[in-house]
Image (cartoon, rainbow, N blue to C red):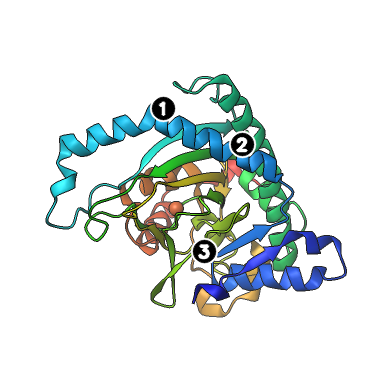
Amino acid sequence: MESNFPVVDMGLLQTEKRPEAMDKIKDACENWGFFEVVNHGISHELLDTVENLTKGHYKKCMEQRFKEMVASKGLEAVQTEIDDLDWESTFFLKHLPVSNVYEVPDLDDEYRKVMKDFALKLEKLAENLLDLLCENLGLEKGYLKKAFYGSKGSTFGTKVSNYPPCPKPDLIKGLRAHTDAGGIILLFQDDKVSGLQLLKDGSWIDVPPMKHSIVINLGDQLEVITNGTYKSIEHRVIAQQDGTRMSIASFYNPGSDAVIFPAPELIEKTEEENKLKYPKFVFEDYMKLYAGLKFQAKEPRFEAMKAVETTVNLGPIETV
Ligand SMILES: [Fe+2]
């Protein structure tokens, strides 16, 4: 089934085949919430360096700590399903509005420099993709970037994860099912050890590992802004019994004070009963709610924000 998974050759966007590539992105956004891009402009050499340094850092600084966590919680011997933790080893880097790459402990200087460079390239790719989405949606160029802007610009960060071999993958998920809260997510994942799955039409489908590709998925904010034309899709990571899976997910999100609401142009195009489907809210309020409800369905989150909307005056901090 995964052979249908949409793979977009971004090189085609500069050729006469541009309309086909744009259609593929449109179909992926409407029907999958996920796609994989190749020829995305980030050099294979940089990706290889990021991968080598990330795997080296895991071995040197993270693996032992993870093993100790597993031992202290007795996770090797669990007999029943664990639903309150994920079998993953992670750390976070912030890039926008202010970088913390030089403050995060345990990283060597080369790794910091490479991750900073990688983040800059991913930021460009995210903004490029947002404009392609605008074009497919019939929104003016720059609309989504502006919608995310708030007073200090978008937030952009990276979650670096490793999923070590797990003795009980049927009882402990690598990462439990969820939709992403933010805007657009760019994932550089291991090309050998798989495990990422998305929910499509009621069944879990593998996101195929592909060397040097970047997996793109859409978060809850794009669902709101597109008034449901695009949807954030549930995904999860199945831990594997062999091999450690590397996953570097970068989140291009609205600024904390950005006011998020469906694009008026897209509301006009929807049928009457869907016109008031999505709320208007300040992004950081959504994130506060998400923090406690990440592993639950998104619809109650939208409903809760709607309830808040009626009591809060959002007037003075319009973004558009
Ligand atoms: Fe996610």
Q: Amino acid at mark 3?
A: Pro
Q: Within the image, what quadrant is residue 132 found in? A: bottom right
Could you say which quadrant of the image residue 269 lies in? bottom right
Q: Is residue 256 visible?
A: no
Which residue is located at x 67 percent, y 67 percent? 25
**Label 3 Cα neighbours within 10 Å, binned few <14 / some 14-19 / many ≥20:** many
Q: Nearer the viewer, mark 1 or mark 3?
A: 1
The residue indicated by pointer 2 is 49
Query: Where's residue 60, x and y in %?
Result: 41, 27
Q: Few, some or many C-alpha atoms within 10 Å of disc 2 (few <14, some 14-19, many ≥20)? A: some
**Viewer-proximal residue, 267 or 95?**
95
The kind of secondary structure element at disc 2 is: helix
In the displayed structure image, the side of residue 281 where residue 16 appears, left or right: right
* Dot label at residue 208: 3
Q: Which mark is residue 60?
A: 1
Q: CA distance from mark 1 to mark 3?
A: 28 Å
Q: Determine which quarter of the picture holds residue 316.
A: top right
First in sequence: mark 1 or mark 3? 1
How far is mark 2 from mark 3, CA to CA?
21 Å
Which percent across, then down, holds residue 173?
30, 55
Label ID, residue 286: none
Q: Nearer the viewer, residue 292 or 318?
A: 292
Give, as a three-letter code, the residue at label 2: Thr
Does the CB distance between marks 2 and 1 fall below 8 Å? no
- Identify residue type, mark 1: Lys
